[in-house]
Amino acid sequence: MAIFKLHLPILDEIKQKGLRPALRDKKEDIVTRVTAGLSTEDVRSMLRDDPPGRPNPRLKPHSEGFWLHMKPTYYNNLVDGVYPTFRLGWLSTFFFLIEIVTGVLLMVYYTPSPEFAYTNMLTILSNVPFGRLIRDVHRLGAELMVAIVMLHALRTFLTGSYKKPRQFTWATGIILLLVTWLLSFSGYLLPWDQLSLWAVTIGVSMVEAIPPEVVGRTVNLLFRGAPEFGANGLLRWYLLHVVALPLAGIIFVGVHYYKVVLHGHSLPPEAEEIGEDTARRVPTDSRTYFFPHIATRELFYVVAVTALIVIGALFYHAPLEPHADPLVTPLHSTAPWYFLWLQGMLKLGDKVIFGLIVPGVLIGGLLVLPYIEVGPSRRYGHRRIGLTAGLGLVFAFGVLSYMGSPWYAVQTSPEQEAIAELLPQTHPGPLRLADWNGLDIGTYEASAYAQAPTGTLRSVLAEFEHSVEAIDVPERSDYQGVIVIEDWQTNLKKLTLRILWTDDASGDPGEYSQTVYLHKDSNYGQGE
Amino acid sequence: MRWHIALGTLFVLILVAVFGYIAVGEQTRMQSFTDAYDARQIETGAALFETHCRTCHGPQGKGIIGVAPAINAADMFNGERLAAAGFSGTLTDYLEGTISAGRPIPSAGTSYPQRMPTWSQEFGGPLRKDQVNSLVAFIENWQDRALAEGGEATAPAPAGEPIGTDIAVNLPPGDAARGEQLAQSAQGGCSACHELAAVGPAWAASGDVPGIATRAGERIQEADYTGSATTAQQYLIESIVLPNAFVEPGYQPSIMPQDFGQRLTAQQVADLIAYMDTKP
């Protein structure tokens, strides 16, 4: 007696039908299972773009499969063009996916500890095949995703698509905008370089202003993990970046998508009667079905956008500044570009009012906008006040961002600024990028740049002279720039940039200088 | 739809081509980043040396007599210094260890009575590990030039019979000029602590404190004097060869090297005392 009996149904079928018909039926069965309801013939006819049969078999994957139940079965031709969606929502989701994939790859090489994080970055750049590409795509994708999500919100506002019945879709969208901002921002800290430490320090110090004082202090402490950013703070931001925020993102993308399928894509404002929403009632002659047209196109987008971003990463390299140092604040350190408006706002005055209350009211206002602004018409002509206010906000974003940049109302010494032109603290700058061999040993006056022995020196000195000339401090005159180049070690030169002046009142000489060491092989031109 | 399929296929090919292009250059890119980072470490190390090390080891690491030894010296790189210290690891390990942990007690038999501070955060110092590594990279970059220059790095043996620790010894006549020279040389190294820094009591008169020549006579009369000298000259010999016999109030014992009795001849001690006598 057999202990167990091996039973393969296929063998029975072969016995019954013969080999070829049995295998054909089995293949058919597998295709139908994988496609959630399509037969081989259905797939073939779809690829040939034959007219669908009745009932349309191509709708089955939407109703029976998991992945496609969140995609509409057909689109209204009116929303199938570039206008009115500009594909921004789709792009946001796709970039989110790119970030998840590249992010998981980066996690393989990353340890969230101040002791190792920066070394891990160096390893990714120096010892991981495709490491720099993955990091560049992750960083480039993050910046683009923030921009795309913001544009998506702007587009939704401009076409009035936030209005009834899509109020809640808009609210989840604003939450997703915040999640995107925070995702990108929390990623800033992880390389543990000067840029990350100081950008996040600036950002987090804002919550310290939350009144009353004990709340601000506690929240600040929660975000930093200690009075100063360190191991605890890094771990917290890492967990936010790789667990909490992506989870929130996935959940709200789910809700957002569900609502889009539920209410349909909103039509262009001029296409429907005022106060009506006809997105769900699509005339049969105005439908584009997901299979095969939209699916093919989206597949094409996936490939095209991936290729473009990979090509982009050949030219864009994510910056990596020197190791984070809580004792050295780099000149001109700023918040990331999408938070510059906040930094600009802080320059307007009180930290509590402009750093918390105004942004809080703004974002809260955006969140509940569709519940407050209940005007029935989505037509552009009927929304002059709303559109003007919206564009005003965009304009204010631009102006405040400029005000948040180091070029507006930042008090530093003009001598320091002049040297920073040649020797910036946040990127390599002209002196580090200059040809090392052209920096001949000697002492050179910037004003005599034309007499310098090499072309490299002439251009460096001319640039120095240009920034020294631009210094304008009352009661000081006779500004003069000097560069001293010394042979310091094998392949190492010491460069001293010195600015001299005379104090008008006392006639005393003044001096400001900065030193840099340059090695022959330091090769700052690689883009990091 | 056809266009989408055709263009999509084209983009797939482009993507494969770009990946191929990157893959081909990847080894070179990784190597060039590694080289660049090594070079940048030397730059960082140079700046750190300037801030933290030059005050004692000199701007070019040539050392300052009596304060800190030369690092930019042939014996550092040809293995002599490591052998003398009985260190069996690599030079990189030696430098990293010394910078990180410092020298908790002054090295015996040298003219360097000061401790070297600990530098690594691991041992309570100010520098991170990567900064210590940068300093090591900078110091190691001296190798070629230090070896090419060669030169004597260790102090020469005494030019005759050492004086020993008998403070009642008869001294030959001393010469103040030779004494001054010896005090300021690598072999004596006295002036580093007794003239320049405030590590030991100053020889010269300062304010209402008289110079060493006067103090020597006064000290032995004082109640808290613990040594066995009976004359001013014996007191000075004792201070040189048995520095712990009496330590002036306000100073630490064992800071001054204990072995001058083995390193100096009677003539040299006589010269030094003659020089000290010029500082009443």
Image (cartoon, coloured by chain):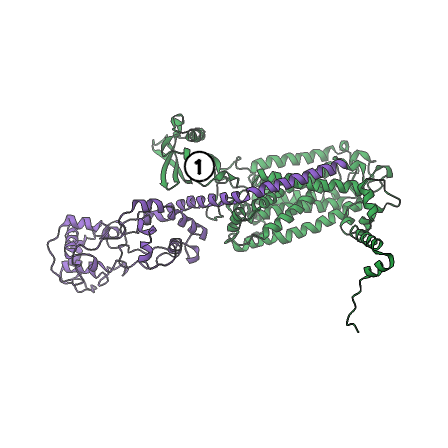
At which x and y percent is residue A27?
A: 80, 52
Specify whether residue B122 is in view.
Answer: yes
Q: Amino acid at mark 1?
A: Gln
Front residue (pair A167, A74): A74
Residue at the limit of the structure toward the right, as seen here: A54
Q: Give x and y (percent) for residue A349.
A: 56, 40
Question: Relative to residue A39, is residue B192 drawn left or right?
Answer: left
Position of the N terminus of chain A by quadrant: bottom right
Question: Residue B205 in the image: x percent, y percent?
Answer: 20, 50
In front here: A203 or A467? A467
* Chain letter, disc 1 residue: A
Residue B85 located left or right of residue A462: left
Q: Residue at 74%, 37% (x, y): give it.
A: B4
How many discs mark residues in the rendered view? 1
Indicate the quadrant where residue A7 lies: bottom right
The vertical placement of B89 against A428, above or below, is: below
* Circle 1 Cα neighbour tier, 10 Å, few/some/many (<14 / 14–19 / ≥20): some
Most foreground residue, B39 or B16: B16
Quickly name the residue at label 1: A416
Q: The residue tagged with tag 1: helix, strand or loop?
A: helix
Chain letter for green? A
Placement of A411 over or under A192, stated as above or below: above
Q: Locate residue B93, reporting x and y percent.
A: 40, 55
Question: Can residue A225 be seen here?
Answer: no
Query: The chain drawn purple is chain what?
Result: B
Quick one: B212 or B20, which is closer to the camera? B20
Q: Quadrant of residue A80?
A: top right
Which residue is found at the position 58% from the left and 54% from the top?
Answer: A236
- Give the answer, above or below, for where B195 lies relative to A517: below
